[in-house]
Image (cartoon, rainbow, N blue to C red):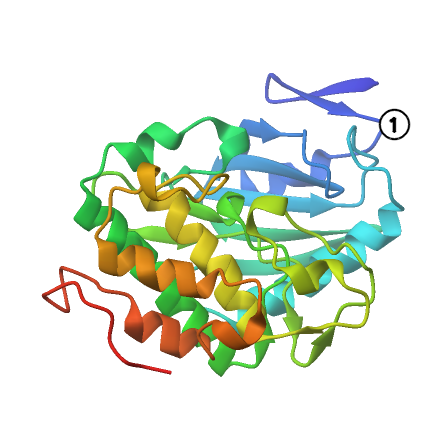
Amino acid sequence: MFVTELDGHPVRLDAPHDLSFIARWGAVFAVFDEQDSGNLCFGVEGAQGRLFLKYAGASTMRYDGAVEDAVVRLRHAGQVHRDLAHPNLVTLREAVDVGSGHVLIFEWTDAVPIGRQYGRSDVVRSLAPAARAAAVQQIYDFHVHVADRGWTPIDLYDGSVMLDPDTGRVTLCDLDLYQRAPVVNEMGRMWGSTRFMSPEEYEFGAQIDEVTTVHTLGALAHTFLGDDRTRSRAEWVGTSGQFAVAARALEAERGRRWKSVAALAHAWPHPWIRGTPVVPAVE
């Protein structure tokens, strides 16, 4: 392991790498060097305010692939974020080639990442069930936008979600692997967390589409209102109507799920907007 420093913050790498270009955007105040994606991430503060930088081009500690592949994926991520710009998506300011690498510059957010790996489930638990249900609605509505724009989520999981506990506002991030539809499973076991993956994401040659997304979104409802590992009714703090909508989304048989993300989003009983929590007859 090679350790360098940026503004007093250690950065752990697999090999030496020149990161002096980061000073172009300001002083580093946070380092995230443990990702297995091949990316290095930094919190930077300068003339443009606080920014989040995501860089591919260095040999990182936990990434086993080729650096060049990480760079290609990050360039693709820039295309995804530009095309899916939305109030609930982190704001991409610019994308820049730096030497043999590539860096994406996002606006900084103080929203808290809720992924299990961050150990901040307390942020979700601090909200009332109605606010949690509203957060689920925001995720669903954003993915209606994703589908309308012709994209298919890949590797969507709780680590893609950040939450402002003061306002209940959701911010999505890390959409690097989203793909233009149509998508076919060419891997067998695809990228993703097992807690959020559908059966077809393990099946070589299977179609990956909105019905697949519906399954993942059903699991995310349990992240906010229950337990996404067990999906147990006993752990559920939402309404019975909400549980029924999520249960239909999580059906193993594709034909039994909601037929589109829009149908799921419309069916979700949102107490702040739709009043009485019942399951609408929407296909």
User: Relative to residue 251, is residue 8 depicted above or below?
Assistant: above
Is residue 36 visible to the viewer in this orientation of the structure?
Answer: yes
Which one is in front, 141 or 267?
Answer: 267
User: Relative to residue 149, is residue 31 depicted above or below?
Assistant: above
Is residue 163 visible to the viewer in this orientation of the structure?
Answer: no
Residue flagged by tag 1: what amino acid is it? Ala
Q: Quadrant of the C terminus?
A: bottom left
Q: Quadrant of the N terminus?
A: top right
Tell me where residue 88 appears, x and y as whole percent. 37, 60
Give neighbour class at mark 1: few <14, some 14-19, many 20+ (Cα, 10 Å).
Answer: few
Task: Identify the residue under disc 1.
Answer: 15
Tell me where residue 191 appears, x and y as whole percent. 71, 53
Tell me where residue 152 appears, x and y as whole percent. 60, 71
Quarter assignment of residue 188: bottom right
Identified at 66% across, 76% down, the residue is 180
Identified at 87% across, 44% down, the residue is 65
User: Relative to residue 85, is residue 271 depicted above or below?
Assistant: above
Which one is in front, 210 or 55?
Answer: 210
Is 165 left, or right, of 197 in this rendering? left
